[in-house]
């Protein structure tokens, strides 16, 4: 270990070599790869989550562009119906489960332990398991393209279209198994973050002093822990119908396809808040930092987030106003949906009030936060329109709804995540992102996004249903569709600018220093990038914005022999993730004992994992 | 159960129609999009269902615009007024204001109540049962076509719904396979067709209903609004609304079928049709063709389109469809001349037979 001690001393000299030291292994490429696949460091896992999510973003974005080419003109034959159905199914599934969720989880991973003054998450190895399960599930789902059998029953997978009678091919098998695997990842991760936030906060960091992003991570994790089991039940029913000939959703055998809709949306609506709340958290921090003012009405913003988390459970059937549940059920879900609009609106007013009287710096991060405020409000208000059940009878499953949820999920969740990237990139890499490219990204995004999705409101109002692979010229919606297609390509270009900026700035950006924005929360007290143990000394917190109001001493680098003992790398998480994925994938064989092979592998891995000590001083390998 | 004041031809409150304002705005950066929108959701042709939705939509729309204007104006003011300037002192560190918080919570709650009350009234009014004397039509969804049955009139037809003007209609809707959704936007909103094997006199909860009274004669476009598999995008339909007298004439005509003169091409087509696999799935009133799996072809010649709104109804198109329906509609369950379909072998019909059958079907008018 003597050589790594030497490099540790050299590495503490500057942020630049610290980054090189943290993320590459001095012993060469193979060792670097090995150190990443066995890592249990929450920061490395966060970087891997973000990289994987950006990779899937490229895939999902390419799918969107292919769809937009097909829909640019009426009666187009650029792709056929089957291909189009696969594209929109995979676009929705990818963007929700493989992009928006893991991108938020990337920030949970990297930022939350730093914000609460912890050295890692509560279960570092489980954290690695979450990532690998997610990655395997996502790759497996996308591997279906290689067999020309990508899922084609839409991202909501309504029964009984997904039954073997109406979807005999392997397409829906890929979907049900892929989502089941990815669900394991979300569940494990959520339990980890709940435990971390409850147990590992720095001394003095009470719940009502937590940064808003950590708060929203906490709420989101609770929603995940309670919502994922519901979709798991639905997926297991569906898997049983398809693989073992049960009839949960088969109407001719007494099953009920509407049951799927209830189960899916009892998960699906909380899922919307799983997507948006992390961005609301990022938003709260970015607005406060760049206005140089504490968040206005902190307790109200926190309670509004919790309230949204709770009420989010009682609104699911507003996705089902056309299902025919009757006027009493419809009215109930109208009222609950209207109620949930109140805390959402309150958050918007609190952000405005935070900026009021501030000293606003228009950094790229702040521009995206302002963009969220302006664009998400449009999506929220069109949401009120279809919360009104009779109005929804016209708008449901039309392009109006496609416009609405892109204004919330892209205009809200993704815009917030972009803000997060610009905000925390210096902390992760020790370098500043290019502000010029960041502003170019913002303006091309703003134009491309609105040009893509605003005309969809009109296409929908003029009667264009969603999920159609083509449309007749007589609907007279061609111009709106052409505008959307042009906008989509501008949007695509803006995303490439963003990726280029990430890549280039990580290599050539200006050194950032510990706290380039003058931000108030704990993650900015340690160096950029933080040492693998995060904090030499766990800081003591005396107020809500510790770096603004009280003295948290700047981080002092430690000599190697003074470093705290950190959890050791382990290859059991990735092997266990492989076992879990394999178990599900082997279900495709439809032979009852074959999945047991995967299950046996999983059992062996868990057993070995359990008997591997978490801290192994002798094998401590990180510099 | 007329809900509102609209007389035929007068589509009140047009000046409030938001699209009339926003299209010019949009056309600043998009090509102007004028002209007719035959499937528009904001141009109701009924006296009850459609206008009830339209009124509510406008109420919510203008509240939403008001809120959006407030948020955007405040935001714009803040961005201009409070942008950072060199040498700014540290801003006053305020943490909140209870009065303001309570104020905007209550304001949001009031807007919500103002929207919710008319919403719930409309929910109940638009789902009220049709009164006596309503025309009952049973709608059955199929992958990817529509079956319309008129039980009292003893009529079965497909893809083109005929309705009398000014008479209340109750659609009773189920599906024969997967979930579909009936949507003719100018009549009002959509409602799903859930899979259900309907027994005689079944009034059970699985049968979804839509009730409305159309006030203008004409042709109305609609299509399936719930993703139902491969050719979901090609599951169109038309409603033809005509005077009561014309409707009754049509009902009469649907009881039987004209028989072509012996020796004509149409007669040879009838012969070919009745002796091939066509009759396994299709029915033609008054003949031996009594299949129930495919759309009824009774008076096919009187329809404007074939293939669920896909092709104009000409003998050439009918022949092309018989030759290879999958060319026009992927996944179609009807076999072609050389390709099987829906579990059935290829029909193997000769070109002469195909043209004769097309002539026969077109003669059924």
Image (spheres, rainbow, N blue to C red):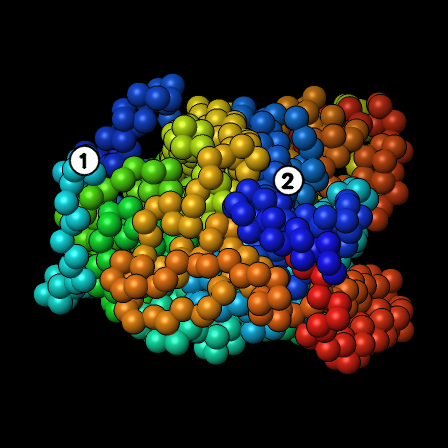
Instruction: Work out whether residue B189 or residue A354 is closer to the camera in this orientation and state it.
Output: A354
Distance of label 1 from label 2 (alpha carbons): 42 Å
Q: Residue under circle 2?
A: A59
A535 versus B78 height, above or below = below
* Neighbourhood count class around disc 1 (C-alpha, 10 Å): few under 14, some 14–19, many 20 upward: few
For the point 38% across and 19% down, the residue is B31
Q: Residue furthest left?
A: B99
Report the mark closest to the observer, 1 or 2. Answer: 1
Task: Chain letter for mark 1, please.
Answer: B
Q: What element carries label 1?
A: loop
Where does residue B329 sit, x and y in percent of width and height?
69, 35
Based on the displayed image, in which of its 4 quarters is residue A2 positioned?
Answer: bottom right
- Residue at 45% over, 32% down: A434
Where is residue A573 shown, x and y percent of the image? 73, 67
Task: Examine the rendered structure and indicate whether residue B261 appears above or below residue B143.
Answer: above
Q: State whether discs 1 and 2 lie on one chain.
A: no
Quadrant location of the N terminus of chain A in the rendered image = bottom right
Q: In this view, does A511 lie above or below A128?
A: above
Q: Provide the secondary structure element on which disc 2 rests.
A: helix
Res A167 visible: no
Residue at 60%, 53% (x, y): give it: A9
- Which quadrant would residue A584 be assigned to in this image? bottom right
Q: Which mark is residue B85?
A: 1
Vertical arrangement, residue A504 with respect to residue B177, above or below: above
């Amino acid at each position: 270990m003597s050589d790594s001690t030497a490099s540790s001393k050299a590495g503490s000299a500057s942020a630049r070599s610290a980054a090189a030291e943290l993320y590459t292994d001095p012993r060469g490429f193979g060792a670097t790869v090995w150190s990443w696949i066995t890592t249990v460091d929450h920061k490395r896992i966060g970087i891997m989550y973000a990289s994987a999510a950006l990779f899937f973003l490229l895939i999902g974005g390419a799918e969107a562009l292919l769809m937009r080419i097909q829909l640019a003109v009426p009666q187009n034959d650029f792709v056929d119906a089957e291909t189009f159905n696969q594209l929109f199914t995979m676009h929705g599934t990818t963007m929700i489960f493989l992009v928006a969720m893991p991108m938020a989880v990337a920030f949970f991973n990297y930022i939350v332990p730093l914000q609460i003054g912890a050295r890692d998450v509560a279960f570092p190895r489980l954290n690695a398991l979450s990532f690998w399960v997610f990655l395997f599930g996502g790759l497996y789902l996308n591997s279906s393209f290689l067999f020309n059998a990508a899922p084609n029953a839409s991202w909501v997978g309504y029964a009984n279209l997904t039954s073997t009678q109406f979807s005999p091919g392997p397409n829906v098998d890929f979907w049900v198994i892929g989502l089941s695997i990815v669900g394991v990842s979300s569940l494990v991760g959520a339990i980890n973050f709940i435990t971390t936030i409850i147990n590992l906060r720095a001394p003095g960091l009470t719940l009502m002093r937590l940064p808003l992003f950590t708060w929203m991570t906490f709420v989101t994790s609770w929603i995940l822990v309670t919502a994922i089991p519901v979709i798991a039940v639905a997926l297991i029913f569906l898997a049983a119908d398809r693989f073992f000939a049960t009839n949960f959703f088969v109407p001719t055998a007494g099953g009920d396809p509407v049951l799927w809709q209830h189960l899916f949306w009892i998960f699906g609506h909380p899922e919307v808040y799983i997507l948006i709340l992390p961005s609301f958290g990022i938003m709260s921090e970015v607005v406060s930092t760049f206005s140089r003012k504490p968040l206005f009405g902190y307790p109200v913003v926190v309670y509004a987030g919790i309230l949204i988390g709770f009420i989010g459970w009682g609104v699911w059937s507003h996705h089902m106003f056309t299902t025919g549940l009757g006027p009493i059920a419809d009215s109930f879900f109208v009222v609950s949906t209207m109620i949930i609009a109140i805390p959402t609106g309150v958050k918007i007013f609190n952000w405005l009030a935070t900026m009021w009287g501030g000293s606003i710096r228009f950094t790229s991060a702040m521009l995206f936060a302002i963009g969220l405020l302006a664009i998400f409000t449009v999506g929220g208000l069109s949401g009120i329109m279809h919360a009104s059940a009779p109005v929804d009878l016209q708008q449901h499953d039309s392009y109006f709804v496609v416009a609405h949820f892109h204004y919330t999920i892209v205009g809200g969740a993704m815009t917030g995540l972009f803000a997060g990237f610009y905000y925390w990139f210096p902390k992760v890499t020790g370098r500043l992102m290019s502000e010029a490219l960041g502003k170019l990204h913002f303006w091309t995004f703003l134009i491309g996004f609105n040009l893509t999705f605003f005309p969809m409101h009109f296409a929908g109002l003029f009667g264009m249903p969603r999920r159609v692979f083509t449309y007749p010229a007589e609907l007279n919606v061609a111009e709106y569709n052409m505008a959307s297609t042009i906008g989509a390509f501008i949007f695509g270009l803006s995303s490439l600018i963003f990726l280029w900026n990430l890549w280039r700035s990580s290599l050539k950006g200006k050194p950032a220093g510990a706290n380039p924005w003058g931000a108030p929360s704990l993650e900015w007290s340690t160096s950029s990038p933080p040492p693998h143990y995060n904090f030499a000394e766990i800081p003591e917190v005396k107020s809500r914005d510790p770096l603004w109001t009280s003295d948290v001493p700047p981080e002092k680098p430690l000599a190697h022999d003074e470093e705290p003992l950190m959890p050791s790398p382990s290859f059991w998480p990735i092997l266990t993730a492989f076992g879990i994925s394999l178990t599900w994938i082997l279900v495709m064989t439809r032979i009852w004992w074959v999945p047991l092979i995967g299950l046996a592998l999983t059992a062996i891995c868990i057993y070995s994992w359990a008997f591997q000590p978490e801290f192994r001083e002798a094998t401590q390998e990180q510099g | 159960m007329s809900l509102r004041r609209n007389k035929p031809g007068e589509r009140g409150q047009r000046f409030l129609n938001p699209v009339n304002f926003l299209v010019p705005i949009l056309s600043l950066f998009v090509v102007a999009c004028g002209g007719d929108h035959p499937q528009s959701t904001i141009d109701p042709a009924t006296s009850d269902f459609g206008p009830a939705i339209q009124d509510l939509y406008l109420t919510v729309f203008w509240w939403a615009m008001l809120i959006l204007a407030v948020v955007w104006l405040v935001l714009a003011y803040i961005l201009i007024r409070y942008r950072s300037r060199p040498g700014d002192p540290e801003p006053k560190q305020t943490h909140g204001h209870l009065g303001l918080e309570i104020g905007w919570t209550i304001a949001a709650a009031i807007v919500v109540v103002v929207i919710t009350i008319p919403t719930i009234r409309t929910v109940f009014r638009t789902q009220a049962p049709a009164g006596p004397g309503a025309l009952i039509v049973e709608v059955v969804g199929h992958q990817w076509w529509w079956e319309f049955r008129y039980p009292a009139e003893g009529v079965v037809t497909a893809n083109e719904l005929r309705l009398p003007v000014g008479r209340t209609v109750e659609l009773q809707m189920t599906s024969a396979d997967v979930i579909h959704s009936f949507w003719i936007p100018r009549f009002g909103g959509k409602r799903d067709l859930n899979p259900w094997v309907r027994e005689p006199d079944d009034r059970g909860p699985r049968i979804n209903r839509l009730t409305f009274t159309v006030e203008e004669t004409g042709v109305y476009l609609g299509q399936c609004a719930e993703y139902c598999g491969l050719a979901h995008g090609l599951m169109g339909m038309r409603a033809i609304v005509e005077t009561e007298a014309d409707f009754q004439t049509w009902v009469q005509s649907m009881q039987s079928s004209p028989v072509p003169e012996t020796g004509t091409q149409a007669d040879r087509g009838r012969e070919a049709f009745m002796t091939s696999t066509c009759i396994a799935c299709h029915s033609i009133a008054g003949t031996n063709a009594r299949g129930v799996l495919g759309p009824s072809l009774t008076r096919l010649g009187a329809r404007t389109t074939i293939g669920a709104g896909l092709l104009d109804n000409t003998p050439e198109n009918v022949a092309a469809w018989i030759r290879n329906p999958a060319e026009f509609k992927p996944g179609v369950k009807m076999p072609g001349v050389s390709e099987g379909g829906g579990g059935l072998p290829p029909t193997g019909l000769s070109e002469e037979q195909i043209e004769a059958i097309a002539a026969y079907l077109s003669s059924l008018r």
